[in-house]
């Protein structure tokens, strides 16, 4: 896997360092939408010398280079998403878990009526409870 991660970093114009590879190994493979603090907790358990600042700088670099998406899904909470293709999100009110919803599972209509806006992108954020 490490070779795949190094290739991906190179493909996105990111110089692979041990710290960047460690962060990428987690964030590119997780199905979660981790915050920077969650990334720090996970990566530092296997890479104890990594600093919180390195985690933040690495995540910001990955976003800048287009390797991750930075999402502001609720006030004051930033999470990172490795899934780059268009999709929507569902947030479970009880657990805070974030699930991906495929783009074509929802239809958003009448965007042309928003003439005062030039829309470049959109996503739907659904909130509720996962049915058991």
Image (tube, rainbow, N blue to C red):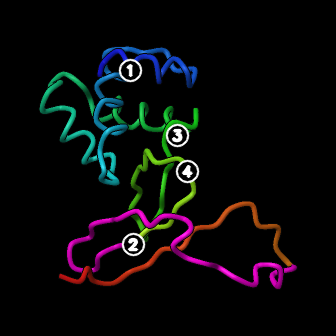
- Per the rendered image, the range of residues in magenta is 90-115
Q: Residues within 10 Å of mark 3 (few under 14, many from 20)?
A: some
* Residue depth check, mark 4 versus mark 3: number of the one nearer the observer: 4
Q: Is residue 132 left or right of residue 73?
A: left
Q: Estimate the spatial distance between the alpha carbons at disc 3 and disc 1, rounded to whole Å.
A: 19 Å
Give coordinates of residue 77: x percent, y percent. Answer: 38, 62
Which is more N-terminal, label 1 or label 3?
A: 1
The residue positioned 55% from the left and 21% from the top of the image is 11
Which is more N-terminal, label 4 or label 2?
A: 4
Give coordinates of residue 60: x percent, y percent. Answer: 48, 38
Q: What's the mark number on residue 4?
A: 1
Q: Is residue 118 left or right of residue 106?
A: right
Which residue, given by chain and number where applicable, does mark 2 sit on?
Answer: 90
Which residue, given by chain and number where applicable, does mark 4 sit on?
Answer: 85
Which residue, given by chain and number where applicable, does mark 3 sit on?
Answer: 63
* Residue depth check, mark 2 versus mark 4: number of the one nearer the observer: 4
Which is more N-terminal, label 3 or label 4?
A: 3
| Residue 91 location, quadrant | bottom left
Which is more N-terminal, label 2 or label 3?
A: 3
- Kindly check if marks 2 and 4 are in contact, taking CB atoms under 8 A apart as contact: no
Q: Is residue 106 magenta?
A: yes
Which is more N-terminal, label 4 or label 1?
A: 1
Q: Quadrant of the N terminus?
A: top left
- Using the image, determine if residue 41 lies above or below residue 86: above
């Amino acid at each position: 896997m490490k070779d795949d991660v190094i290739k991906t970093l190179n493909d996105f114009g990111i110089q692979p360092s041990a710290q960047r590879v460690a962060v990428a190994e987690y964030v590119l493979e997780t199905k979660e939408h981790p915050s920077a603090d969650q990334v720090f907790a996970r990566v530092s358990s296997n890479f104890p010398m990594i600093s919180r600042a390195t985690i933040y700088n690495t995540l910001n670099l990955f976003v800048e280079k287009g390797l991750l998406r930075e999402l502001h899904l609720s006030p004051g909470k930033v999470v990172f998403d490795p899934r780059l293709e268009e999709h929507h999100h569902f947030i479970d009110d009880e657990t805070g878990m974030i699930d991906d919803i495929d783009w074509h599972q929802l239809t958003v209509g009448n965007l042309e009526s928003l003439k005062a806006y030039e829309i470049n992108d959109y996503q739907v954020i659904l909130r509720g409870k996962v049915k058991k």
